Amino acid sequence: MKIKCLLWAFLLLLGACDKVPEPQESFAGLGSDAADFAQVVPGKVFSFPEDHGPHAGFRIEWWYITANLKDEQGNLFGVQWTLFRNALKAGPTQAGWHDSTLWLGHAAVTSATHHYAAERYARGGVGQAGVQAVPFSAWIDDWNFATRPGAASALADMQLKANGAQFAYDLHLTSNRPLVLQGEGGYSRKSDQGQASYYYSQPFFSAKGSVSIDGKAYQVTGPAWLDREWSSQPLTASQTGWDWFSLHLDRGEQLMLFRVRQTDGASYMTGTWIDHEGRTQTLHNADIQLTPLETTDIDGRKIPTRWSLKIPGKQLDITTQAVNPNAWMNLSIPYWEGPVRFEGGVGYLEMTGY
């Protein structure tokens, strides 16, 4: 799903001159009313490369990459890179410091023994952060995700870079496989009340490059996953957080699934089964059995870091285990995100609202 926190505290800090809605009960205010913004409706016809770029009429949007990596000694690593665009108010974007867009970047590196995360913020209109569709480039300061010169298409040949006080990575991502439209042709429902996002992925990236932790560099390879989503109100006011998985199966399939938790104890759950050629099948609540098995105490919270996942219709019965159970994103609004492993594959897990 990858609906990340839009961080109302940052909006108040960076956009104090604009009117900002009060936080609602939903996680990070993502269920607050957005009637003045563009709405997500079924039937959108996606257009590429244009839809790789920003969608100014919508309130929230992100470009998100994870990679499950391994060095020559078999050590496991995870990498995350995310750029968020948030519009403080509806209407046309203005030039310079009158631009009402805020940008937020998250980056992290995880190993079995270490987890480091960093964040950056920028106001739109001054070149510090942004996204362009052709040639594709997404950046905030010196963190960037961009098409390499001479690439055959926008997302076929990419470079991904970020760094923090105790980590850095520089990865080359390639794919000749098709993009995947999540949900109903890219219309991804988040509730029974109609909340939704436009959502597509590139789950077939292969990554190669370097990861540095505490000054030590590792040469790594492995699968990577891109998610693209935009919306204006992706949650209801009573949805408090989510558990989101992206999984690479050794047998060639890919799997995305999520559950959005509600204040009444119920949840909305769905997913997408992706075969080795990129063909998709939507999974519904009745198709998925998802059960937390073990928790880790982090920052006064119990975070489920070991899960049972069964999809009987696909003969899938696995137990996912966090590579590092302490992969806590201790940022302005904290959440858990890190690589997972299971017999027959690897993947990524994000959990918010705990």
Image (cartoon, rainbow, N blue to C red):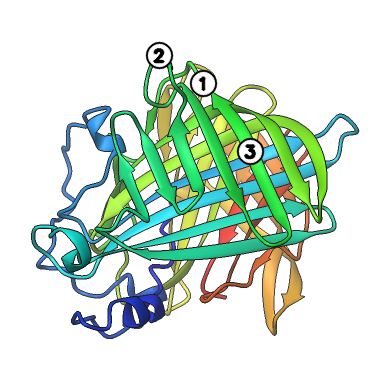
Q: Is residue 23 left or right of residue 319?
A: left
What residue sits right under mark 3 in the picture? 170
> Between tags 2 and 1, which lies in front?
2
Q: Quadrant of residue 294?
A: bottom right
N-term mark: 2 or 1: 2
Mark positioned earlier in the residue sequence (3 or 2): 2
Distance, label 1 to label 3, CA atoms, is 17 Å
Q: Dot 2 lies on which element? A: loop
Disc tally is 3
Q: Quadrant of residue 96?
A: bottom left
1 or 3: tag closer to the N-terminus: 3
In the rendered image, which residue does mark 1 sit on? 175
Q: Is residue 179 above or below residue 114?
A: above
In the rendered structure, the answer to whether residue 301 lies left or right of residue 159 reads right
> Horizontal and vertical percent for residue 178?
41, 21
Q: Is residue 31 above or below residue 12?
A: above
Determine the image quadrant of residue 281.
Answer: top left
Kindly indicate whether the residue at mark 1 contacts the one at mark 2 (C-beta within 8 angstroms): no
Residue 156: x percent and y percent? Answer: 45, 21
Taking depth in this image into account, of 123 and 116 the one nearest to the observer is 123
Callout 2 amino acid: Ala
Which of label 1 and label 3 is nearer to you? 3
**Considering the image in quadrants, where does the C terminus appear?**
bottom right
Q: Is residue 5 left or right of residue 245?
A: left
Which type of secondary structure does the marked residue at label 3 adopt? strand
Decide: few, some or many residues near mark 2? Use Cα within 10 Å; few <14, some 14-19, many ≥20: few
Q: Is residue 284 visible?
A: no
- Mark 1: few, some, or many residues within 10 Å (few <14, many ≥20)? some
* Marks 2 and 1, how far apart at CA: 10 Å
User: Which residue lies under the disc numbered 2?
Assistant: 152
Q: Secondary structure at mark 1?
A: loop
